[in-house]
Image: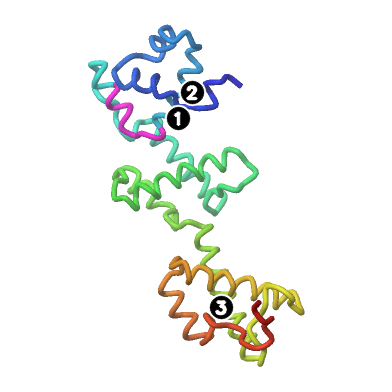
Amino acid sequence: MDRRLRRAPDAEWVLMYRLGLSRQRIAALVRAEPNTVGYHLVIARRQDLGLEAEHQAAAGAAPAPYPSPKDLARMKGIIAWVSAEGRIPEDRSGDRDERSMARWLSGRRHEAAAGTLDPAYRDGLAQVPGWQENRRESEDEARWHRRLDQLAAYREEGHDWPRHHDYDSVREHTLGVWIHTQRFKRRRGELDPAKVKLLDAAVPGWQTGRTRGRRPRR
């Protein structure tokens, strides 16, 4: 792979483009292939949504519309895909096109969260129920609540706190690793306060854990 492709986008090329130079002009000045320069500029435009407008303004042209007809066609294609498949594209899919659609939707989610989502996108994506939800986060949240229920049931059966070392069963190990992680996050201040309250209510004493059967400290 070309050395410059490994560190795209090239800051110097992006600056030239921002100042109004065309891809072909930049390629001629730096003695690179136009396609190579174009590759860097595609990445730069994805990272900086205002880059194209600055380039157009510096070049003396009218700013390109955003979303462009190509952008809107992309959205319509994704809406059609969701309608046909009955689900949201997944970023872990084995299909490259599906991963690309998932990344596109992720970008729109970030814009929606920041309050910068263009009305054209907002209105179009309204046809896709649940598009703003992060499926992975939703699955992680559901798994967390299942583990809490499982731990509460485990304790109600009369068991001591599950261990993540020297465990007696796969069930104990699974729950032991989970509650150990919650304690670790709590100590570091990384555990959601709402989850702390849920743990306190469902499994009182979870922060202290097992008090008998511990190996003596040296």
Q: Is residue 47 magenta?
A: yes
Q: Disc 3 marks which amino acid?
A: Leu
In the image, is 50 to the left or to the right of 133? left
Give me the disc on residue 148. 3
Q: Which residue is mark 1?
A: 43
**Residue 190 position in % (x across, y down):** 45, 65
Q: In the image, residue 24 lies at what x, y percent?
A: 41, 10
x and y, in percent, of residue 37 in the image: 46, 18
Kind of residue at disc 2: Tyr
User: Predominant secondary structure in magenta?
Assistant: helix
Up/down of 91 relative to 172, above or below:
above
- Please name the amino acid that badge 1 sits on: Ile
Badge number at residue 85: none
Name the secondary structure under disc 3: helix
Determine whether, in the image, residue 174 is placed left or right of residue 6: right
Q: CA distance from mark 3 to mark 2?
A: 48 Å
Residue placed at 28% from the left, 21% from the top?
56
Labels 2 and 1 touching (C-beta < 8 A): yes
119 magenta-colored: no
The circle drawn on residue 39 is: 2
Q: Please name the residue shown 57% across and 80% down the image.
A: 149
Q: Which residues are magenta?
A: 46-55
